[in-house]
Amino acid sequence: MNATVVLRPKDYKSATKPVWCPGCGDFGVLNALTKALAGLALAPERVAVVSGIGCSSRLPAYTSVYGFHGVHGRALPVATGLAVARPDLTVIATGGDGDGFSIGGNHFLHACRRNARLTYLVMDNAVYGMTKGQASPTSAADWAGSKLTPDGPGIAPFRPLEIALSAGAGFIARGFSGDPNGLARLLAEAIEYPGFAFLQVLSPCITYRPEQLEYKALVSAGFEPLADRNAAFRRLLTDDGFTTGLLYRAPVSAGGSAPAPADLTDETATLAELAGEFTAARLRGAADHES
Amino acid sequence: MSPEVHAGASVALFLAHAVTLEEEAAERYDELADTMAVHHNDVEALFRRMAGYSRLHRDEALGRAQAEGDVLPTLRPWEFAWPSPESPESAALADTHYLMDAHQALSLALTAERQAQAFYQQVADTSHDARVRELAGEFAEEEAEHARLLEEWLTRHPPSAAAALDDLDPPVAVD
Amino acid sequence: MTPSFSLAVTGSGGAGVMTAGQLLLDAAALAGRYGLMARSFGPQIRGGEAAALLRLADRPVESPDDRYDLLVALDWGNIERFADELPLAADALVVADPGHGAVPAVIAAQTGRLIEVPLTALAREIPGGRPNMVALGLTACLAGLPAAAVETRVRRALARHGTDSVTAAIACLDAGRQAAAAHRRARLPVSGDESTADPTTALDRWVLNGNEATGFGALAAGVRFCAAYPITPATEILEWLAGRLPSVGGRLVQAEDELASINMCIGAAYGGVPALTATSGPGLSLMIESLGLAVAAEIPLVVANVMRGGPSTGIPTKSEQTDLNIAVYGLHGEAPHVVVAPTGIADCAPTAAWAVTLAEALQTPVILLSDQALGQTRTIADPPATALPAARRTAFVPGPTDPPTAYRRYAHTPDGVSPMSCPGMPGGQYTADGLTHTTSGVPSTRAEDHVGQLDKRRRKLEHHDYGARWGEVHGDGALAIITWGSATHPAREACDRAAADGLSVRLIALRLLSPLPVAQLEAALAGVRACMIVEHSHTGQFYRHLRAWAELPRPTLAWHRPGPLPLRPGEILEALHHLQAQQEVAA
């Protein structure tokens, strides 16, 4: 790519037309992502978007960057492997609440702990859209909209921000698909964070949760960025689930010990040296060798 | 664009907003046309036409910039000072439906054009820069004209019988 | 037939049995011998019963013998639990410490040759002395190893503990050797103190286990990323790589589970960095879904699966060849991938390297089926005669006139292999997908795309020239054994013994298990009248796999039994004679 060419958000979109329902919040997230990438002027070939399975996990194919659409729940490990092996890239994992918090919940916990340099963007609509609207981990306990749980799931909803904070994530934010420009700014900050950055995005499902179209009246940009983890915990005690913005940004030095990224040029040992460890000669001392 | 920020905007900054407003309006109409195509709704054609108009208006704005001799500043998407979460002529994604009819599509577009008109009118009313006031006034008048055309168009496309969004087929499981 | 000397050193964990065994094997290497050492443990993490099981020879040896010539017991803690792993020769010598009670019946019943040596008391007489070092001196002497080699090894091994430790250990070795002196020629070892081995060549030999060899082979072929979740008996592969990958610019990440480790490898390999993970049956089961993804998305990677007794948690510390079915047939849908297996401990290095080259060349996952017997048995082996193969991936190169969207990641090609881009390459952008896709990678449900991509992925494997590594063929008898993996060396030794009895038996050991090299196998079987399939399983998975794909001679006898007891040459030889007798009756 010619460095002097200024890329616009639409240059980060592919020719593949989304299969999302008209009115789906994920369109706003796609627009926010392409705006963030354009705003950061990242070369498309140096960005990879990795997803699992679900409506929102279709997103990579709608971009013009490198994409990976894997199996259900495993976006984070794929993204982690890529980010550690290829530290020169910008790696973004995406998916939905079912993918990230239910089948992939364990990876979410450990990605927060591991602090590899990647952004995790979860499009949360509190429902499984691609399997016809079952309750997800973020559905209310009494949400009775699914045939699978006609009386509601009956269990307390997963609280992504609290769990991310508990698990050690250093960058925690919430955005709204109906505010693509604000979301783009949050995403840009997340992408530039030198560690694991988690971004929950409220993204309404028009088909199974049409009541979520009221989100635009409920969300408020109430988070003020905190650098103190205790303060962030306290702030979450009064979180209504619709407050947006950057909740917590750990000072870089306070981040977990991210795996050292690979440096394939950094060869200090040769194969012959490594093979030498196996030789019988190694089993006797240097002194013996001289005697 | 809060009035305070906007009141002091230069001609170049104002025109950067105008160009992006139309550019994003065109892209949104294209996006809506694409999604209607995927869902086999022929209001696709209508959105495609709207996208074409917006692109013409963007070119006009670019022409103004050239005529003014201004090099437009490059802003990052979140650095624009819009009065709303998106640029004002972007048709609201949330107000679409795969079974929407022409009347609903035109209403959506009308809302967008009126938002654009309101944006320009506010600039025309508040800017400290005389040339900005003049340009914004012209643009507001153009948007008002677009709105009038859409209103007329709407009369030719009354709400259809199916517009209650009765969904005869349930959604399907995909993945 | 391999003249050799087999011995076992047993005792409770903490007594230093494994240390003594390993030092003995190392000393044998320094003395120019070949040999191997397996380990047997109780289930306790610390302090359980333990046995170091060694076989020493003047020629390369990778199979355990039928029986042990010498048993040295530091104590008798729970010996009953693994007495059936310690079959003694009729004239075997048992060395027991009278301070630890009477010889248990299960041992006493096997041989009448017993000597009592107060190992603990002898050690106590030496300041800082330890019974296991007394046992080492004694055992080395009875095995005919030169005292100098043992001493050299012990000096080196204990140097970091200071001179007092070394002095005490040397005194213990002497005490043990003197105690053995009376019984010095009680059992003739393979050769005397004066080894005729060329010391230079001997010092170039490798002393390693199959897991280390696997790690080395993978690294040599180009693996630079490993995601690891610990599991017995595969963990040593991961630990070996953890210590070495950084020195060649690579990285290892400890994953939260096997679902993560396989997907981390997929991510790294998608990024252009050759990747491997290692696991055992339960972990492989968890990885299977994602292996299907790697097939569909055409991501190269290697899973080194070190088999253990199954199903479920099974017997993690014992060997079986019972993950063959899941490795070959366990993926849902129709998912062509490669399954290979080393034919021995030393062969783990070149076969692991080969696995990496196959994965990278074919852009598909390769399962390397090792097992506990290969992975955790330490051997003295000649280093590989030829350089290990290095991996090469067919990379995407943008054409000068291609529009940016021209790249078709999954393009149909004559051999099915499509040039692969990876992030960072301008113009190579695509979305790798587990959904059925077009040649560009766009999801599709069209029959043309589904069948086209299925054909393409099958074609990759069918068109590949697997070369000479598909298997080994030894001998040209009209009787044949077909085997694989850790069964190879016991079967080969059975063939050698049969030859000594005047019965010529052909041995065919497969490295390439899937796709089965049918043409090569059938050619190797030319002129064979009767055949025996040898494997370490309860149900004959390998036999059924061969039957599914290849024309086998009639009769073909399926000979197999499960773990935990290792396969031994004698039982295979017996089966061979049985087959031969049947043939004579039939004739």
Image (tube, coloured by chain):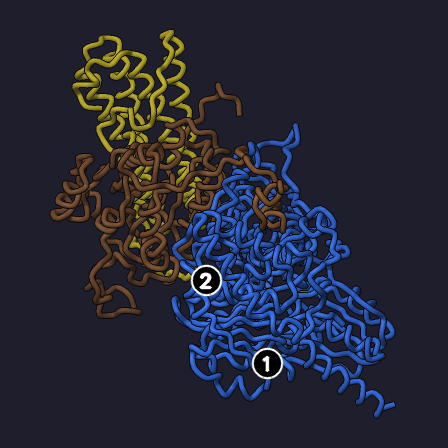
Chain colours: A brown, B yellow, C blue
Give whichever of discs 2 and 1 has the lower sequence position.
1
Asked if B16 appears above or below C201 in the picture, the reply is: above
With B142 as the anchor, is C285 left or right in this view? right
* Chain letter behind tag 2: C
Graded by Cα atoms within 10 Å as few (under 14), some (14 to 19) or many (20 or more), the crowding at tag 1 reads some
The amino acid type, in three-letter code, at marker 2 is Ile
In front here: A94 or C126? C126
Q: Name the residue type under label 1.
A: Pro
Q: Secondary structure at mark 2?
A: loop
Q: Residue C490 at x, y = what percent?
A: 68, 72
Task: Residue at 85% x, 70% y: name it.
Answer: C476
B105 versus B68 height, above or below: below
Looking at the image, residue C444 sits to the left or right of residue A74; the answer is right
**Which one is nearer the viewer's eye here, C66 or C553?**
C66
Asked whether residue A231 is in view, the answer is yes
| Residue B152 showing in the rendered view | no
